[in-house]
Image: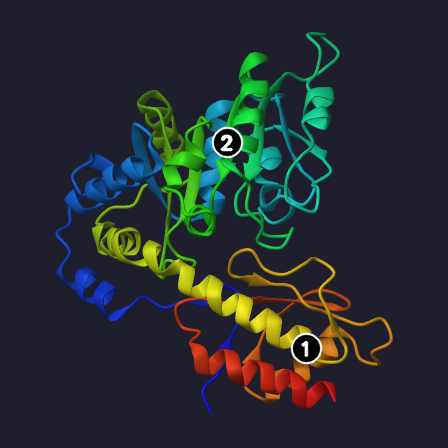
Amino acid sequence: MSVIDLRSDTVTHPTPEMREAMAQAEVGDDVYGEDPTVNRLEALAAQKMGMQGGLFVASGTMGNLIAVLAHCERGDEVIMGNLGHTFLFEGGGISALGGIFANTQINQPNGTLLLEDIRSAIRADDIHHPISRLVILENTHNRCGGVVLSEKYTRDVADLAHERGMKVHLDGARIFNAAAALNVPASRLTAPVDSVTFCLSKGLCAPVGSVLCGSKEFIQKARRLRKMLGGGMRQAGILAAAGIIAIQKMTDRLVEDHARAKWLAEGLARLPGIVFEMGMPQTNMVFPSLAPDFPLTATDMANRLQKWGVRLGVVAPRRFRLVTHYWIDDVAVARTIEAFKANLI
């Protein structure tokens, strides 16, 4: 029995076309700027984001860290959500390596930060305070259910920040999912911000890497920081080749993952013992919960489902996360619903 792995879209494998492109990739020393495939990837990524330049990095976490270090000085402050990936899941890197303070505000259920909360969090010009230098947004927002931030909201935040002399960085790990859900080019969603990181290795199926995009000056500084962090890769075109295919071929099919996530959620919602406290999916993430009177915990259910060949994430005592991706087909969705049904009744 094949395993249905819904824990995350990070479990995706490269497609056969990616493997062929990697095998045939033209390479050079990227630290010298001489890897033609990396250069093509960075130019393509910048064009897709509507930015002047791009930088290939090992991961989204590295991209976000470099962005914060490039925008801020030691002792500065970053305003971000209390459920944001940079705050929860990136090892405290901005503080440990950058000496930068995280001022967290409450994420609303739709992934936003209230404009008034951001405005109130911006420090006055006072020697007793750190300098408020940067706002970080996340689109799609992982812990809020894979929800989408609108172009208008992002612009409102950017206008507020820019009026106060601050910058805005977008953790756009799944920005192409947001673009697919809103049926707009990704560049529309990134236009208001000063920098953006997006992942190649999640729903886009590349095996490794993210791209950080911004102005030419920003990317020049970011490149130096990448080297400091040990991220200067050599013949990285072998990896970048898969990233090019990811952007060119995989972004347009994300609507299929969203459709399957909706189908999966609707199927689970019809089962006794399942509730959707976080609402139905907007993109490729499904967050069902066990009803309060159901006798098992989410971990108990996950262990049972694994015996049925279904792997999923447990994000709270009674809540799961299931993420659809390229390797989850219609049969996998149907099998998952049946596995839940067999273990709920």
How crowded pointer 2 is (Cα within 10 Å; few <14, some 14-19, many 20+) is rated as: many
As drawn, the label of residue 95 is: none
What's the residue type where badge 2 is placed?
Answer: His
Regarding mark 1 in the picture, which secondary structure is present there? Answer: loop
Q: Quadrant of residue 310?
A: bottom right
Observer able to see residue 30: yes
Observer able to see residue 165: no
Depicted 139 relative to depicted 217: above or below: below
User: Mark 2 touching mark 1, by CB under 8 A?
Assistant: no
Q: Would you name the residue on which mark 2 appears? A: 169
Q: Residue at x 39, y 41 (%)?
A: 186
Q: Position of residue 264 (x, y in %)?
A: 56, 73
Q: Position of residue 122 (x, y in %)?
A: 68, 19
Q: Position of residue 1 (x, y in %)?
A: 47, 92
Query: Viewer-proximal residue, 324 or 39?
Result: 324
Query: Viewer-proximal residue, 226 or 120?
Result: 120
Q: Would you name the residue on which mark 1 appears? A: 270
In the image, which is nearer the foreground, mark 2 or mark 1?
1
Q: Quadrant of the C terminus?
A: bottom right
What's the residue type where badge 1 is placed?
Answer: Arg
Depicted 196 relative to depicted 278: above or below: above
Which residue is the extreme one toward the top? 126
Q: CA distance from mark 2 to mark 1?
A: 40 Å
**Colour scheme in use:** rainbow
Q: Residue at x 74, y 80 (%)?
A: 300
Q: Residue at x 53, y 16 (%)?
A: 162
Depicted 267 relative to depicted 130: above or below: below
Regarding mark 2 in the picture, which secondary structure is present there? Answer: strand
Q: Position of residue 222 (x, y in %)?
A: 38, 30
Q: Residue at x 80, y 80 (%)?
A: 296
